[in-house]
Amino acid sequence: MMKSKEKGFSLIELLVVVVVIGLVASIAVPYLQRAIRASQAGNTFATMRSVATTQMGYYSQTSRFARVTEANNLMSGAIGTQIGTEVHRGRFVFAMVPANPTDAELREGFTMTATRTDPGEGVTYLYELTQSGNIREVLP
């Protein structure tokens, strides 16, 4: 009786391994995406808290609140990249409401939003910061 000296995995064994890896990936990927969105939201909240602090300091010096681009300059670009009257940071866009407030409007108060629209998800995330320093999640 002669024994076979062939070594390796059979096609069935390899197929079972590929199926198991596929199942694990199909379960893990949505959780990973959710964790990434949560970390981005946390980062946005932290940025808005820093902006609120900067706004209070700016108001005490100039008797008006800063536009989002002015706040970004005061923070040495820590909010993000300025594009027009908006500041982009990752997938979030920071903007003032109205888009270009007058100095008189900024003496009364301000509203700044952080918006993230992801067409693949079909969900819009919207956070709002006001002169009171309150940050609230408007959407979803």
Image (spheres, rainbow, N blue to C red):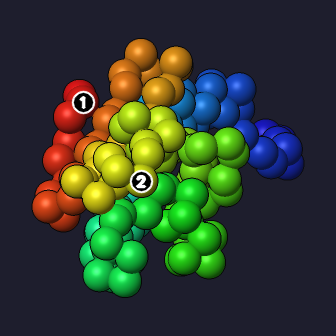
Q: Quadrant of the N terminus?
A: top right
CB under 8 Å between discs 2 and 1: no
Residue 98 shows up from this direction: yes
Residue 29 visible within the image: no
**Left or right of 109: which side holds 30?**
right
The residue where tag 1 is placed is 139
Helix, strand or loop at mark 1: strand
Q: Nearer the viewer, residue 134 or 21?
A: 134
Residue corresponding to mark 2 = 103
Q: Is residue 110 above or below residue 22?
A: below
Q: Secondary structure at mark 2?
A: helix
Q: Which mark is residue 28?
A: none
To which quarter of the image does residue 42 belong? bottom left
Q: In the rendering, at what x and y percent does residue 126 appear?
A: 32, 36
Q: Position of residue 3 (x, y in %)?
A: 79, 44
Residue drawn at x 32%, y 47% as measured from the top left: 105
Q: Which quarter of the image is occupied by the C terminus?
A: top left
* Dot placed on the residue nearer the N-terminal end, 2 or 1: 2
Left-right relation of 76 to 71: right
Residue drawn 35% across and 50% down? 104
Amino acid type for the residue under numbered disc 2: Asp
Q: Position of residue 100 (x, y in %)?
A: 50, 40
Which residue occupies 62% across, 26% down? 15
